Amino acid sequence: VKQVYTFGGGVKHDDPRTRDKVITGGKGANLAEMAGIGLPVPPGFTITTEECVKYLAEGANFSDQLRADVAEALTHIEKTVGKNFGDAADPLLVSVRSGARVSMPGMMDTVLNLGLNDQTVQGLVSASGDERFAWDSYRRFIQMYSDVVLGVEHHLFEEALEIAKEDNGYLNDTELTASDWQKIVAEYKAIVDKELGRPFPQDVQEQLWGAIQAVFDSWDSDRAKVYRRLNDIPGDWGTAVNVQAMVFGNMGDTSATGVAFTRDPATGEKAYYGEWLVNAQGEDVVAGIRTPQYLTKAARERAGAKPLSMEEAMPDAYGELADVFELLEKHYKDMQDIEFTVERGKLWMLQTRSGKRTAKAALKMAVDMVAEGLIDERTAILRVDPMALDQLLHPTLDPKATRDVLAKGLPASPGAASGTIVLDADTAEKRAELGESVILVRVETSPEDIHGMHAAKGILTARGGMTSHAAVVARGMGRCCVSGASAVSIDMKGRTLKIGNRSLKEGDVITLDGSTGDIMAGEVPTVEPELAGDFAELMTWADKHRRMKVRTNAETPADCKMARQFGAEGIGLCRTEHMFFDASRISAVRQMILAEDEAGRRAALDKLLPEQRDDFAQIFMVMAGLPVTIRLLDPPLHEFLPQGDAEFAELSETIGIGVDTLKRRADELHEANPMLGHRGCRLGITFPEIYEMQARAIFEAACDVIDKVGEAPVPEVMIPLVATKREVAILRKLVDDTATKVFAEKGKSVDYMVGTMIELPRAALMAGEIAEEARFFSFGTNDLTQTTLGVSRDDAARFLSPYVEKGIYARDPFVSLDIEGVGQLVQLGAERGRATRPDLKLGICGEHGGDPASIAFCEKVGLDYVSASPYRVPIARLAAAQAAL
Ligand code: PEP
Ligand code: MG
């Protein structure tokens, strides 16, 4: 099979591999596609991701076939452009860029202006008629190639340039003349010679293959690995390499370069949005070295900026660009992120891809595009990443709060964040790990900062535009970001900074508003999010298309209320133990646990009964008419024991039993391995009076509430951690008997069900038998994962991340269900249970119930509902709809 595909210059693409992102990567596939629909794309070729995978496994022994194919593809470029690679009279120059299956902005390597050497630079001088441009291009090439391919440190070149500028009294790069650049080229070459002990490569073929290898290698760079881990991108995809004829945005004032979006990636508004720079090359915009200018007149005016927009300064090229925007949106039916260059008035397209966007923008665009007739509801549902909704569900700054605004930057990624200032990525990570909210403040961010950006609640940069690395990455992560705040100046040595005219230091608290660009002193209060508008619209569509119900895991009336607002259709798990920790009742709980006999326990349980009944009554009121699954007590009893002498003394005082007796009982309760110890239904088997009290509280509360709200709650009493049918049988009888008694006492009854959790492999295996006693199953995949993998939930953090890094598990199995392994038990349990009892109700209430990939699996297995924590409910609704489509 072919591993090299050409594009541009009128080549026909009959091989579907050309436009397959898996093979030619996102950038390569889209370049071929754009060329195919007649857009101006500089000719080039793509080496496949398959070749990268082979290279990473076998090293640089490229086959003769590949070398021949590359040579032929290069000839294609030469013929199309009418210049030859390495030609001393009029050289062809190329760019060499990475391009993975999905875009990983800034994470891998790029080399521009390749093909320059001491001879061809002279050819470029005469062919372009622009001496300054030619020497500037050569120094850019040496700098980039040396950094990316040869591993010479970037700062050595920067320093040489700074010194040259100082010596000449220049402030800006634009002041350097042709002969200045020529001198700098000589210095740069000397730096390379000194650092490497060999000269900068003059052979253009050597340059080309060096760059190809560097791009392949950059797939495994540290920053690319971190990015992949954060975005769940598999390590075995590899990157393609795109080699393309250079076009120049730095050929004077009729040339330019820019980055644009067909709609606003922060708000979703239908307005072209972008940045450009006259007389510059692409990396100047993206790297945030020069602060770019507005693309449209409207945006410039809104910002009150002076430098002309592209619409005003280059109306013809802008008009052509606007036509391209329209064409691309119609073609891809999605918002596009575009890179372009204008070379002496002529527009060239260098890249298009579906643009990264904030959750807010994703929602607005999906809803708008349905209204425009561009996409249908189903496509709209599939467009929005469920996890991104999380960004919208969290509080924003209270509009009524007073703001002590220190300065303003660009509103690069919306949301609000308060936290302490940290000045580097490592510190951000360290302090965040200790539970601190931090704001990462940098002059500009580089891809090496990505772990710190992830750890931070917000990001503030002094330089860079809306399309700078910081902005793009922050939007992708859903971090709030204010960029290009020129009023921020940082003193790294003293670890202090100035924002506007205020002096601050690392550790001081600031607040960012990513929607306005405000930087504020101190912490600013927040308000709950608005769930109307586009959000509500998309959710209505999702609800229409999903089959599974979505419930919530909650045990306080406040959480239940919030979950209902988020659309929960019942409670899938009410963990009753959380109710026992309440300060007002913990001593009764402790008295119950430490009692020597049943009579002692019953005395304490009598005190707990009214409290527990009140808990359930409140929840039933909030959840009127909806199913409420209440799990009977689950954790090992010693979790409730007093800690330390003071607590023992206090308890002894309250319940009138000596400290020594209490301590002896506590020792007796100690367990070597509590997770597999005296917990779950084992408590109900050994101390039936505990479950009896809880069942009574449930039924009394349910009977009381009917009178108040009219709509009866539907209690589902759930027995945890069972392994055998007999356990369920014994405890079901206990619950049924209690119900019968309560209903007789109250003179009324409610519908209820008794069911069980499937949390142990034996329970999944014996599901057929267990279903004879249980009317519903809820898969407790937290414990089921722990017991199937033999990995302790409480201790896993220490070794699981290396496991994920090494690919032993694709994702943390406590976050995303191990579908291959644990999934088999879920499937088998569901099948065997349903074989016995066809109307067995099936749900999941482990953390996986809020994870989109796990939800997709639940749909496949045919579960009736998923249950997730309140904030995950909307995520689960959307994910369930996507799974059903
Ligand atoms: C479970 O094990 O998946 C579960 C929901 O119960 P818990 O997390 O309370 O053990
Ligand atoms: Mg459990």
Image: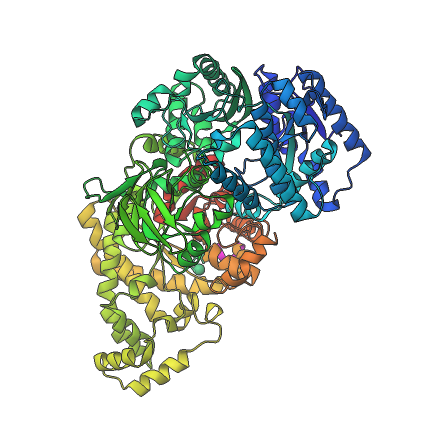
Vertical arrangement, residue 165 with respect to residue 824, above or below? above
Q: Is residue 122 magenta?
A: no
Q: Is residue 770 magenta?
A: yes
Q: Position of residue 430 (x, y in %)?
A: 43, 58
Quarter of the figure with residue 292? top left
Looking at the image, residue 830 sits to the left or right of residue 746; the answer is right
Colour convention: rainbow
Say which quadrant the N terminus sits in.
top right
Q: Position of residue 152 (x, y in %)?
A: 62, 46
Tell me which residue sits at (46%, 40%) in the image: 473
Q: Is residue 623 visible?
A: no
> Which is more toward the observer, 133 or 744?
133
> Which is more toward the observer, 387 or 266?
266
Main structural element of the magenta stretch: helix, strand or loop? helix
Which range is magenta?
768-772
Quarter of the figure with residue 217? top right
> Residue lying farthest top?
316
Tell me which residue sits at (53%, 42%) in the image: 158
Quarter of the figure with residue 121? top right
> Which is more toward the observer, 515 or 593?
515
- For ligand 2, which image quadrant applies? bottom left
> Which is more toward the observer, 739 or 17?
17
Tell me which residue sits at (70%, 33%) in the image: 208
Vertical arrangement, residue 411 with respect to residue 637, above or below? above
Q: Position of residue 117 (x, y in %)?
A: 68, 31
Q: Is residue 489 visible?
A: yes
Looking at the image, residue 776 sits to the left or right of residue 342; the answer is left
Q: Position of residue 65 (x, y in %)?
A: 80, 31
